Amino acid sequence: MTTLSPEPRRSDKKPEKKTEDRPRVSRLDQPRELRRPLLGRALDRATAPDQDRLGRFAERFARFMGTARFLVYMTGFVAVWLLWNTVGPHDLQFDPKDLNFTLLTLILSLQASYAAPLILLAQNRQDDRDRVLGEQDRARDERGLADTEYLTREVASLRMALGEVATRDFVRSELRALLEELDDRARPEDEQPES
């Protein structure tokens, strides 16, 4: 007697096709999807939550750099640096005049290289805020214009309706005429004025 091993059951489900295994067909009517390296995507995910924090820092930094206090601090720093390395003891000078203050130049260049992108980031955030405020102002103005047009149409329709309604003076004159007519009927014929 031979024993047969049971056949593996086949599932009725069709195997799912993986879309990633198929080569993508490039279409000429659609732009190609940009693929970033794995490290770039990982860095994007890692820094994404901190974008707002970096933006707030950039705004504070740019705001501080635009103050007179920053100019005074920077001027004082450079003046002390130059004085120390010009007239200070020669053996304690760390950036001598003979080397044209190379270290000071490098420090100022480094500060400028970080300041420029931070200022641009702060400027971009301010532009985004201004754009949103402009859109909100435009929407508010459109609503105000629509309300004004509606009220104008309502006032015009009221004027047209009032043109058909009797005015106070017209009603008074009609009432006076009716009173005179009633008075004339109530008077005996001998008291009526002769016409």
Image (cartoon, rainbow, N blue to C red):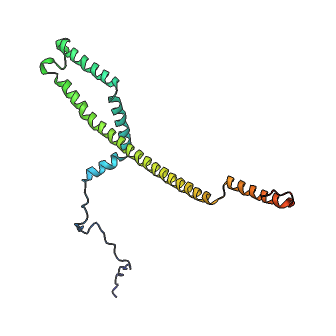
Give the image quarter of residue 160: bottom right
Does residue 190 appear in this view? yes
Q: How many labels does the image show?
A: 0
Residue at 72% of width from left, 57% of height from top? 174
Q: Which of 88 and 190 is in front in this view?
A: 190
Q: In this view, does 31 lie above or below 109?
A: below
Give the image quarter of residue 129: top left
Asked whether, in this view, residue 12 is left or right of residue 90, the answer is right
Asked whether, in this view, residue 119 is left or right of residue 96, the answer is right
The percent position of residue 159, horizontal first and vertical second, equals 58, 56
- Outermost residue on the bottom side: it is 1
Q: Which of 163 and 108 is in front in this view?
A: 163
Q: In this view, does 174 lie above or below 72?
A: below
Residue at 21% of width from left, 17% of height from top? 82
Residue at 35% of width from left, 43% of height from top? 127
Q: Nearer the viewer, residue 28 or 1?
A: 28
- Outermost residue on the left side: it is 98
Asked whether, in this view, residue 31 is left or right of residue 177, the answer is left
Q: Is residue 187 above or below residue 112?
A: below
Does residue 50 appear in this view? no
The percent position of residue 121, horizontal first and vertical second, equals 31, 40
In the rendered image, which quarter contains the N terminus? bottom left
- Outermost residue on the front side: it is 194
Asked whether, in this view, residue 74 is left or right of residue 173, the answer is left
Residue at 24% of width from left, 20% of height from top? 78
In the rendered image, which quarter contains the C terminus? bottom right
Q: Nearer the viewer, residue 185 or 32?
A: 185
The percent position of residue 109, horizontal first and vertical second, equals 21, 30
The percent position of residue 138, horizontal first and vertical second, equals 42, 49
